[in-house]
Image (cartoon, rainbow, N blue to C red):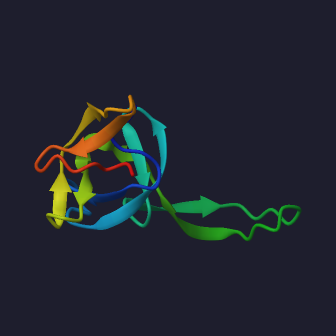
Amino acid sequence: MRKIKTGDDVIVLAGKDRGKRGTVLSVPDNDHVVVENINMAKKHQRENPQRGIEGGIVPKEMPMAISNVGLFNPAKGRADRVGFKVLEDGRKVRVFKSDGEVVDV
C-alpha cells in the first residue's frame, strides 16, 4: 500500500512550487508523482491532423519526487506524515501521524 495515491490532495514541500496545493494525477513509479498544475514544463508538440492534435508549445505537468510532497491534513490545514494501521475488521488504512485520523474512508 502506498502512502500517496492518485486523487490525494497534497502540498509541495520543496522546489520552485513550494507551498502550492494540488491533486495527484498519477504515480508513475515508487519515487515520483504527477500533481495537477504543479511542476509545469513547456512541450514542443508536432501537429498531427489524423488525431486532431494541433502543433505548438503546450504546458504539461512533469513528474516530481514523492519526497517533495506531503499529504494535506484538512484538520490541521497543513501537510502531514502518513502511517498505516490495521482496523478491527482487518482492513489496512492510512492514518495521519500527528492526530491518528484515518485518511481512507
Residue that extends furthest to the front in the rendered view of this protein: 88
Residue under the point 28% across and 48% down: 102
Residue under the point 76% across and 65% down: 47
Q: Quadrant of residue 35?
A: bottom left
Decide which of 105, 78 is in the foreground and name it.
105
Q: How many marks?
A: 0
Depicted 56 relative to depicted 41: above or below: below
Residue under the point 26% across and 59% down: 11
Decide which of 38, 105 is in the foreground and name it.
105
- Quick check: 37 left or right of 72? right
Residue that extends furthest to the right in the rendered view of this protein: 50
- Quick check: 81 left or right of 89? left
In the picture, which quadrant includes the N terminus?
Answer: top left
Measured as percent of width and height from the top left, residue 5 is found at: 42, 45
- Quick check: 96 left or right of 10? left
Measured as percent of width and height from the top left, residue 2 is found at: 38, 35
Depicted 83 relative to depicted 79: above or below: above
Residue under the point 70% across and 69% down: 55
Measured as percent of width and height from the top left, residue 17 is found at: 26, 63
